Image (cartoon, rainbow, N blue to C red):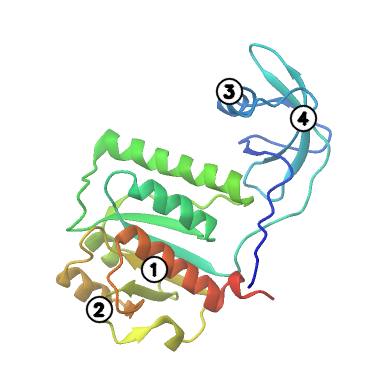
Amino acid sequence: MIELIIASMDSPRFFCDAPLGPGARLDLPEAVARHAVRVLRLPPGAPLTLFNGRGGEYPAVITAITRERVTVSISGWEDVERESPLQLTLVQAIQAADKMDYTIQKAVELGISAIQPVASKRSVVKLSGDRQQKREAHWQSVVISACEQCGRNQIPPVTPVQPLDLWLAGPGRPQQDLKLMLAPGAAHSLPQLPPAGRVTLLIGAEGGLEPNEMKTARLVGFIPVSLGPRILRTETASLAALAAIQTLWGDFKGA
């Protein structure tokens, strides 16, 4: 029997979108301060780790807590990154309910480099205007929370939602990546493909991609791949594929 022991981070981690540096003293942003004191109940003297997405992380300690603010002192800087060697972009058709949040959260934990939400023909959720902007901001906050939890110091961007057909035809579509899309019954499986350092993975919403969408994707270089004989839900398919790709070509395989 093989037993796995999962180690946790030594101190709570918080994203702080501000200039950080050794010796600096600063007040935590309101939302971060509220979480640190009211949720985690950290007292004065408690250690924590800050990062701002610009490289590395900063050990710090809480020096004062008042009704209005939580003040911390930064003790140093550590040149630590926990990024995958793969440049891995997830093109995810918008999912319903909490599935999109779950997929984004776990994709960040699995080492995703960027997330491109797309509106496909079978996407149940339709977004536009202010509602779309609010969802994009919410998804970016999900990314940040996932980075805090899993130890990443780089923040993967969530790019603005695009209709899938326009994204496939547009200049933002990657040219040099290995482009993959999941398709039940596809002739190729992931282990049959050559290793790649840059991968774009296209996943449909509930019900998958429509035949015309798959045809368009194939015309611009996407390779249909199968994850086996069973039909996977959209949120399962995304994460299973990402984990398999990291195992074959990324940091799951070790040094």
Q: Position of residue 214 (x, y in %)?
A: 22, 73
Kindly identify which numbered label has been placed on residue 46.
4
* Residue wearing tag 2: 219
- Identify which residue is drawn at 68% across, 38% down: 12
* Residue wearing tag 3: 30
Secondary structure beneath dot 3 equals helix
Secondary structure beneath dot 1 equals strand
- Rounded to the nearest whole Å, what is the CA distance between mark 4 and mark 1? 41 Å
Check disc 4: other Cα within 10 Å, few if <14, some if 14-19, many if 20+.
some
- Identify which residue is drawn at 76% across, 53% down: 79
- Rounded to the nearest whole Å, what is the CA distance between mark 2 and mark 1? 15 Å
Q: Can you say whether 216 is above or below 5 in the image?
A: below
Number of numbered tags placed on the structure image: 4
Dot 4 amino acid type: Ala
Dot 3 amino acid type: Glu
Check disc 2: other Cα within 10 Å, few if <14, some if 14-19, many if 20+.
few
- Viewed as shown, does residue 74 lie left or right of 152? right
Dot 1 amino acid type: Leu
- Viewed as shown, does residue 221 lie left or right of 15? left
